[in-house]
Image (cartoon, coloured by chain):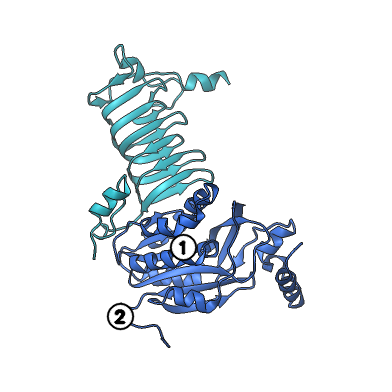
Chain colours: A blue, B cyan
Amino acid sequence: MPGESTVRTITGLLRKGVRREGLPFAAASAHGREADAPFHTKAFRKFLSAVAARESPVLVDLGPVVGSNVSYIGERLGCKIFVEDLYADLEGHVRQGRAAAFGEFLKGRLTQADGSVDGILCWDFFDYLDRQAAAALARELTRLLAPGGALLGFFATVGQPRPFYTKYAIVNDREMRPRPYAATRGRQPVWLNRDIIRMFDRLLVSDSFLLQVSIREILFRKPSTTTAARPGA
Amino acid sequence: MWKRDEGVRPTGASGSLPGSTSVGSDITARGNHEPSRHLERDTVNIGKSVVIKGELSGSEDLVIEGQVEGKIELRQNVLTIGPNGKIKAQVFAKSIIVLGEVVGNITASEKVDIRENGSVEGDLVSPRVAIAEGAHFRGSIDMQRSPARPGAETKPEGKAAAAASAPRA
């Protein structure tokens, strides 16, 4: 049985006349429908622009390796990409019953130097983390990011009816194709916008888009001076 | 299917290794081997029973189905790690195709191609990289057009080593 929020989302989208590919793939998957239709992204293009403007950019990709993404990003930006696949690390922890220790594990997981990374692709990894692990990772990512660097994250706005991870294959700078794959533990409770912003309190929200596929994509930038405070703080 | 079996039979290089499947010397592919009948011209095949420890260099295309530990240099040629190939080495070649397993850093002047079921654990440096669905990769990919910035060091083998070598800002 789909959750009430899922039903409400589908109903809302149908009312707006959204095509099938506009359905949240979480909901589509729950109903046994094809869940890998491309969806439109608005922030990815801005992320690419931000990174492309930097000399010999360095990227960190927190997701599993997707060959087409490597080719697309690498050949377009001529950059260096660290593929870290934290999803695999999380899956390992969950299977071994050590999910609670994942936050501690994350503190030493990324070994790049401080301020050495120009762009970070988080995909939807934060959706799978509890608060402690998410805070630990956010601190680490903030540490890695160079002043002026960009961080792109996807945050689901609806729950997940059954556990799966998603690979995001870049179709072009405006489209992504989600490819769900097996997960032992699903997403954790949906992040509120204010919690996301608090988590990255040393970064600035450059752009935030609520997509029709029930994803909020947020592009963060690290201010040139690390002492810059969050607006309104 | 018999052709497949013949294709992985030790030929050329393996036949030239006297009495043992393991060597520790510098090996030059050129002139030492009769090219495999089943491969294209100027291609040498190292069979799956061959183990090489040391440096391997040459100026012919090479297919490795065996095991190599150390260093492989084919700066002007294509290196193919076959499905049975297991490499634990630094690899330099013009173009590298991985169908087997590689642990170590790979540098290619043209392209690295990790095929389905191929596995690489190490850092890639190449202007073009193709990684097929189903391939395993762990490490970094450097497709930079200019020399890398200091400070964005790749991780060496262990986290402790990485932490020790990575400069802090």
Query: Mark 1 near mark 2, Cβ–Cβ under 8 Å?
Result: no
Point 31% across, 25% down: residue? B52
| SS category of the residue bearing label 2 | loop
Question: In the rendered view, would you say A61 is above or below B102?
Answer: below
| SS category of the residue bearing label 1 | helix
Point 42% across, 64% down: residue? A137
Of the residues shown, which amino acid type is indicated by label 1?
A: Ala
Q: Is residue B43 visible?
A: no
**Residue A113 location (% of width, % of height):** 29, 61
Question: In the rendered view, would you say B161 is above or below A218?
Answer: above
Question: In the rendered view, would you say A86 is above or below B55?
Answer: below
Point 47% across, 51% down: residue? A89
Label 2 crowd bin: few (<14), some (14–19), many (20+), radius 10 Å: few
Q: For residue A112, what is the image quadrant?
A: bottom left
The residue pinned by badge 2 equals: A227
The span from disc 1 to disc 2 (Cα, nearest Å) is 24 Å
The chain identifier of the residue carrying mark 1 reads A
**Residue A123 location (% of width, % of height):** 51, 63
The residue pinned by badge 1 equals: A133
Q: Earlier in the sequence, mark 1 or mark 2?
A: 1
Point 46% across, 63% down: residue? A133
The chain identifier of the residue carrying mark 2 reads A
Q: For residue A35, what is the image quadrant?
A: bottom right
From the viewer's perspective, tell me whether residue A101 is left or right of residue A174. Answer: left
**Residue A227 location (% of width, % of height):** 30, 80
Of the residues shown, which amino acid type is indicated by label 2?
A: Thr
**Residue B135 location (% of width, % of height):** 49, 43
Q: Quadrant of the C terminus of chain B?
A: bottom left
Label 1 crowd bin: few (<14), some (14–19), many (20+), radius 10 Å: many
Question: In the rendered view, would you say B124 is above or below B13?
Answer: below
Considering every residue shown, the one lying at the far bottom of the view is: A232
Q: Quadrant of the N terminus of chain B?
A: top right
